[in-house]
Amino acid sequence: MAPVRTEQEWLDTARTLILRGEGVSAQAVLDQALSQFPSSTDLLRAQAGLFQKTGRDDAAEQVLRKLLAHDAGDTGSAFALARTLDRQGRTNAAAQVLRACLAVDANRCGPDLAIVAIELLDGMDRKRDASAIAEAAIAVRPDDPRLHAYAGMLALQLGEFDKARARYLFALQHAPRAVEWHVPIGLSSAQRYGNLDHPDFALFQEGLERGDLSDLARAELHFSLGKAYDDVGHYAQAAQDFREGNAIRKRTGNWSRKAWRRMLETRLAAKPIASALEPMDRFVPVFIVGMPRSGTTLLAELLSRHPRVCNRGELGVLARLAQQPALSGTPTRSALQDAEATYARCSRQDDAPEARWFIDKQPLNFRYVDLALAMFPDANVVHCQRRPRDTALSLWMQCFLEDVQGYAYDFGDIALVMRDCERLMAHWTRLYPDSIRAVRYEELVANPAGVVAALAQWIGIQPRPPGEIHSEARPENTISTASLWQARQPVHAKSVNRWVHYARFVPELLQIPET
């Protein structure tokens, strides 16, 4: 007769087998263990983990939902289920799971757990759900400055600028290190300054006088001051602060001109992808590409006001797919189908059942237009263009956090990337002339309704009565780019020829040809 094992002994054996990669044996052990201890939370979690590890997400979901039915406040199961649903593109369902679990007992879920949930949902682009969790956590622990900083970040991206400011100021007032949490950049992005008497000028300047700041925090304070001085028309001082901020970011960054050039030449030399897939049912991607700061956010926001268009913001999935070895060179049909399914799942998600067109406005997707059109031959690629000096200045005035934007801190690098963007888009346009359309920023801000209507017609979006088109940004839309303030204001042409204000103070602009 076989010896009777304790629950822990079964669990230890199963975990050892899982670590060895012996999934079949581990499953057999767990089946035996659960026949003896059918309600064991630890054994059921181990089983769900094994299902996840072996790609059986549906089975994992069943187990995790069983655990949550038994204990709705089981945070371990809730987070595991949320991550499982996220992998399937079911981010709305993931958000609901986390919100329901954390609402069971807000006092039991401390700020650290709330922050984990906030970061997870933020990564899924579920900003409104993340904001709800942040605000609920603040209601229980109103003195935690970290929660206020996170709530400020989310309010900013949701266009709730007054709330963002209040949350950011609380964080700064109650945590000296909050200046390291991107708070100054958030504050300066939440409004347009009207005069030099605004308290933020002194706040940012006092921050720069501290001797204990990281390079990034010091750079962000300079960019924040530069933005504030630019708002009030003090261009000489703005240029000085932007120059100091850019110098820090250039010195501490790791963007490589050599790596960029190698990538660009590889892309130009790549053979066209011969095997394209068939269009998907009720799913048409719209890739808005070009240089950052060329109007991509504004165009996406205006186009998404149509009820059947869903704006997913700057998805990173196409770039991740392009790095896969199976998709380099001449990818097989099977590899393209897998990539197509992954991209569609991440873009379609589970919260826009009526949408047919899905916008991906990651500007640097101009690097992978061939892959995008091989996966989705009916996709539309919109190339945003803007006068080079305005583009260069606008890039130079931003403190990007992503390494891929590291060229933006040097005018020589900016000019190189702008030229290469035009070279590569000209290359793609020769190969795919019917799939690519250029939109000029200057024309967009001069006649937004006309430009968007013409673009919608080219994409194939059927005209709707004016009452069915949103006249303003949809409340559910979030904007996490540097244009989060501008894209929510009435469209204007004040940024056309903006570089002229800086020509005396930033002579490098004159070295960039205006074509």
Image (cartoon, grey):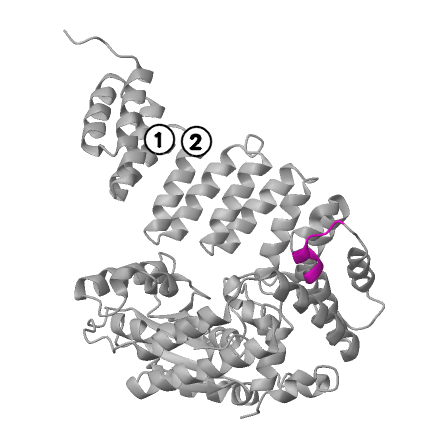
Q: Secondary structure at mark 2?
A: loop
Residue most extreme to the front: 258
Residue under the point 55% across and 48% down: 132
The x, y position of residue 370, in whole percent, is 30, 75
Residue at image point 68% right, 40% down: 142
Q: Residues within 10 Å of mark 1 (few under 14, many from 20)?
A: many
The residue under label 1 is which amino acid type?
Leu
Task: Judge whether residue 351 can be spotted in this image.
Answer: yes
In the picture of the structure, the residue carrying the numbered disc 1 is 67
- Name the residue rendered at 20%, 71% in the picture: 277
Disc assigned to residue 74: 2
Q: Position of residue 20 (x, y in %)?
A: 27, 31
Q: Is residue 139 above or below residue 184?
A: above
State whether residue 357 is above or below residue 149. Answer: below
Q: Residue furthest bottom?
A: 515
Residue 397, position as x, y percentages in the image: 65, 73
Q: Look at the picture and state if 353 lies above or below 508.
A: above
Tell me, yes or no, if residue 361 can be seen here: no
